[in-house]
Image (cartoon, helix red, strand yellow):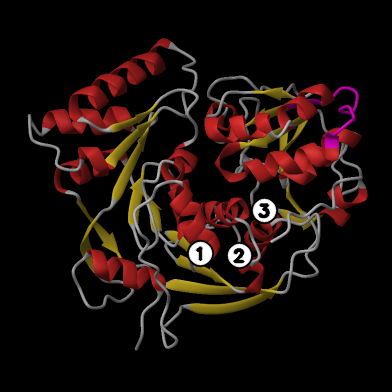
């Protein structure tokens, strides 16, 4: 019996010929990442272990992205400790404004096809867009990785999802991920590895592929992994990544489930009512008024997302009473958007830009606080009650195009019904 992509990567890193779902293995890690929300635990645990050599320090990045900028003294002190630790131990440091962990790690050339990458955030599954096994761990686990370069893993079962057909213009990977949540429910694929394959995946640009993998965290997945192709290799080369070890599943691999989904007739999707899996097609939404719009986060803060918004809002203004914030996923993305004129288009339309980071998404920095009874349309990955500080405000999720179209009209809107909303980047 053959192996899935996840099984092959874990077997290779455990020094085994094969592994099977359910087995526990100790595997070599290629790269590790720690965010500022977990760094204090990591540093504290390393201190408890004594003054030992951190063999894996140079293959670890500390990322200051959630408390960015720090909203209080405690957060500022965590950042100070992280900077000092990086200087002393030789870890890679991404400071305030550099970007969100899941963007700067691949942008920094720290991973490639076939790698095993861990990070202290559930959305580390994003790295599967590059044919890597990416998964979330705790801060104390990273301390063990930094000392040994190894960590234990239970080999997950794999669900193979073949996406056939072609997305209609104005429909994006975000809409696929939301439809998956509507189908399986939040945590409906707990501890599974998802293999996304098929013509619809091949047609996606890297930005959309990262969105596809990122939202697997809400499904509870241990990993979400794509097959590599020339788009993958070209993107990795541009970032200076090491040569790829392209990994594909065997034809006779065993899967917990095999699904085929034709995306050709998929319409834009939205999640509502404080539940990531309360998902409906946008045609079922009856002119739901909005007061706030958010584009960004590790899910949809990339260049193509900002392009979607600019296509819709160019030469126009936000609807009266609507506020809009855009948070690019990294400094590189912000600069690219600046060179393309996208920043000017959106700022002229009435949007405001935040420095690259996670603080607005999770409500830590209090830069986006809706009023009582307000409705927010967001391209983020979660809409939990109180996620944006105010439990008496409502949060809906949609693609960047849906967010921009809604900000233009003042109510949740199918982007395909407004000029520029049916744009699709050529594959």
Residue 13 location in percent, x, y?
24, 64
Secondary element type, mark 1? loop
Residue that mark 2 sits on: 184
In this figure, which residue is indicated by the disc labeled 3? 174
Location of the C terminus by quadrant is bottom right
Residue under the point 70% across and 34% down: 340
Query: Of discs 3 and 1, which sits in the foreground?
Result: 3
- Where disc 3 sits, the SS reads helix
Instruction: From the top left corner, tell me how far across and down residue 30 is, in percent.
Output: 28, 52
Relative to 395, residue 249 above or below: below
Residue contact between numbered discs 1 and 2, judged by CB atoms under 8 Å: yes
315 in the magenta segment: yes
Residue 35, quarter of picture = top left
Q: Nearer the viewer, mark 2 or mark 3?
A: 3
Secondary structure mainly formed by the magenta segment: loop
Q: Label 2 vs label 3: CA separation?
A: 15 Å
- The residue sitting at 91% across, 45% down in the picture is 419
């Amino acid at each position: 019996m053959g192996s899935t992509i996840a099984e092959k990567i874990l077997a290779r890193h455990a020094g085994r010929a094969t592994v099977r779902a359910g087995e526990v293995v100790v595997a070599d890690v290629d790269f590790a990442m720690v965010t500022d929300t977990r760094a204090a635990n990591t540093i504290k645990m390393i201190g408890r272990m004594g003054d030992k050599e951190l063999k894996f320090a140079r293959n670890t990045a500390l990322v200051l992205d959630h408390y960015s900028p720090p909203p209080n003294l405690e957060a500022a002190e965590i950042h100070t400790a992280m900077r000092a630790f990086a200087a002393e131990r030789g870890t890679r440091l991404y400071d305030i404004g550099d970007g969100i962990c899941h963007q700067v790690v691949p942008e920094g050339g720290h991973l490639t096809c076939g790698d095993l990458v861990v990070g202290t955030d559930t959305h580390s599954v994003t790295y599967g867009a590059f044919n890597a096994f990416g998964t979330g761990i705790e801060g104390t686990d990273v301390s063990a990785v930094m000392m040994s370069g190894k960590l234990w893993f239970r080999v997950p079962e794999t669900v193979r999802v073949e996406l056939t057909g072609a997305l209609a213009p104005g429909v994006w990977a975000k809409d696929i991920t939301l439809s998956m949540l509507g189908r399986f429910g939040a945590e409906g694929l707990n501890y599974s590895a998802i293999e996304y394959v098929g013509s619809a995946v091949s047609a996606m640009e890297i930005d959309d592929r990262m969105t596809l993998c990122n939202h697997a965290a809400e499904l509870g997945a241990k990993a979400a992994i794509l097959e590599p192709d020339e788009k993958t290799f070209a993107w990795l080369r541009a970032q200076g990544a090491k040569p790829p070890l392209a990994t594909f599943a065997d034809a006779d691999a065993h899967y917990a489930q095999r699904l085929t989904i034709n995306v050709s007739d998929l319409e834009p999707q939205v999640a509502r009512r404080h539940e990531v899996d309360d998902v409906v097609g946008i045609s079922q939404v009856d002119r739901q008024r909005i007061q706030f719009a958010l584009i960004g986060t590790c899910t949809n803060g990339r260049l193509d997302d900002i392009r979607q918004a600019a296509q819709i809002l160019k030469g126009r203004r936000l609807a009266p009473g609507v506020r809009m914030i855009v948070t690019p996923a990294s400094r590189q993305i912000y600069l690219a958007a600046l060179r393309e004129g996208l920043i000017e288009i959106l700022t002229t339309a009435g949007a405001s830009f935040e420095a690259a980071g996670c603080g607005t998404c999770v409500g830590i920095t209090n830069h986006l606080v809706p009023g009582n009874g307000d409705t927010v349309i967001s391209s983020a990955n979660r809409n939990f009650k109180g996620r944006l500080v105010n439990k008496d405000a409502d949060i809906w999720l949609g693609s960047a195009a849906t967010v921009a179209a809604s900000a233009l009209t003042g109510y949740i809107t199918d982007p395909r019904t407004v000029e520029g909303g049916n744009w699709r980047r050529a594959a």
